[in-house]
Image (cartoon, rainbow, N blue to C red):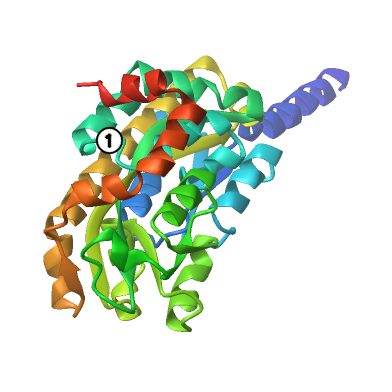
Amino acid sequence: MQMNKLLAGLVISLGLTAPALAQTTTMRISISTAQNSHQGVAIDTFAREVEKRTGGRYKVQTFYNGALGGERESIESVQLGTQELAFSSTGPVPNFVPEAKILDVPFLFRDKAHARAVLDGPIGQDMLTKFDAKGFKALAWAENGFRHMTNSKRDVKSPEDLKGLKMRTMENPVHIAAYKGFGIITTPMAFPEVFTALQQGTVDGQENPLPVIISAKFDQVQKHLTLTGHVYSPCIFLMNKAAFDKLSAADKQAFLDAAKEGTKANRARVDEDDAKGVADLRAKGMTVIDNVDKAKFVAALAPVNAEFEKQFGKAELDKIRNVK
């Protein structure tokens, strides 16, 4: 009788612990843009790969359109551990990891191939380690793309045309300093507020890569686009450091590999959007200035760039410029 009770107790305890062993842990990741975008593709791919590579033990819930807050709020939540993951442009990142500021210097990168080589190489990989001390595990660099100017007032053919335009900027000190150098009246603002601000005329314009301009439907509230390509904008997969540290070695690798796959899908979508973006936006009624005299825009920022050389060190900037 006693033995039967013991067996029953054992069966019950095994019955209770078996599902616990196979328990699924659900995490959350968010973006400020729409699901049908280069950022949506990144987190959808990441979520799928995490589930696949961990045999369903980890699931990642995806949130779009700033549903969990703007980029800065999401990064704060990841740092605090109230949200496990975020995918963000580097716009607000220097507020948390000042070393990342250097990546936002205007006209630093020649093209996407150059930027990707820097981020995937020793410079970018070393910078990922700087996030550890701030409560993050930076899983991988991905891409937002080269940023271009849009506005509702006039064609921008030269830097002089930017003077006096009220532009939404990211909450990023390097961007703000640069745009003031163009004579722009800068208005820092979280991304989810931008469409309404443009619609209501609170700001005249904004600047973002083509994939963002397309997915945010800015053509509905902006008439003029100039392909300035003034700043290359990376994106980053961020995870709460404590949440990452709790993972087994195999699961850590699964998350890192999933982020790499997310980056591949993200960059492919940026390339696709860049290739068809201009024709797409023209068809929607935007005036696109695509024969930009870049040298004039670079020259207009000479005083600001001299300040950046002091701030970051010419040698550090040249190290990035010289990556082949």
Q: Position of residue 243 (x, y in %)?
A: 63, 30
The location of residue 84, given as percent across then percent down, is: 60, 40
Residue at 43 percent across and 43 percent down: it is: 304
* Label 1 element class: loop
Query: Along the horizontal axis of the image, is 308 left or right of 221?
Result: right
Identify residue for label 1.
109
- Relative height, residue 311 to residue 162 (above, below): above
Q: Residue at x 51, y 30 (%)?
A: 311
Seen at 52% across and 34% down, the residue is 57
Residue 295 can be seen, yes or no: yes
| Outermost residue toward the front in this view | 303
Taking depth in this image into account, of 137 and 133 the one nearest to the observer is: 133
Instruction: Please say whether residue 55 is visible from this viewpoint.
Output: no
Q: Quadrant of residue 286?
A: bottom left
Q: Residue furthest right?
A: 2
Front residue of this view, candidates 90 and 303: 303
Amino acid on which disc 1 is placed: Phe
* In front of the other: 13 or 318: 318
The percent coordinates of residue 51 (x first, y second) are 43, 37
